[in-house]
Amino acid sequence: MRIIFLSLITALSLGAFMPAYADMVKEIKGGILSHDVNGLWSGSSRESGVDINIEAIFNHDLQLWGGAISPALGLSINSQGDTSRAYLDARWETDFGGNFFFALGIGAAVHNGNTKLTDTKRKALGSKALFHFPLELGYRLDEKHSVSFFFDHVSNAWLASPNEGMDTLGIRYGFRF
């Protein structure tokens, strides 16, 4: 529990050091995600714990379909020592219904988990490089602060075997510069 608390404080306190990078970074997000959730896209669960997630969304927007595509760089660290990952996405976000927003993305992830089934309590992800698919639904409290529900899925899309995939689900706080 102490590692979760310290990781969250570290992730959220990065906002105090980010003004020097405000011309590059549009927003940072941090949150707690339930790790390897059963019954979602991947269909099964083997691992446990929670993930501490931090993400930087960059200012290089491309306007498309009523929203904007921005690069996002993130990290999810598992509290139990199971699979952690880093990812880079193209993230499309649009605002709707007042302060509500919706985002989805596609990108790549690398992880420190197993590629083959060598432990029945660990996922077999097939390769070290995976596809990353995030979805987010949130609410902007004001110009700078937001809260959101976040889901992401990683898998190798059957480019390697096995392809168990992994899903996380949780909440995040966002701070815009």
Image (cartoon, rainbow, N blue to C red):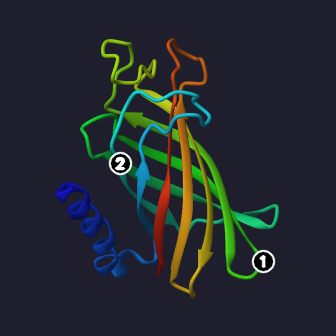
Nearest to the observer: residue 99 or residue 130: 99
Above or below 98: residue 126: above
Q: Nearer the viewer, residue 66 or 97?
A: 97
Rendering coords of residue 166 (x, y %): 49, 33
Q: Of helix, strand and loop, which one carries label 1?
A: loop
Which residue is drawn at the image coordinates 78% and 77% (left, top)?
Answer: 97
Q: Residue at x 60, y 37 (%)?
A: 40
Q: Position of residue 48 (x, y in %)?
A: 35, 37
Q: Where in the figure is residue 78, as x and y percent of width and height? A: 31, 44
Kindly indicate the quadrant of the structure image that contains residue 159: top right
Quadrant the N terminus occupies: bottom left
What x and y, as percent, mark residue 125?
A: 45, 23
Residue 50's label in the rendered image is 2
The earlier-in-sequence mark between 1 and 2 is 2
Instruction: Tell me: 40 left or right of 165.
Output: right
The alpha-carbon separation of the residues under discs 1 and 2 comes to 31 Å
- Can the viewer see residue 173? yes
- Residue at image position (53%, 72%) is 147
Q: Residue at horizontal 33%, vertical 28%?
A: 113
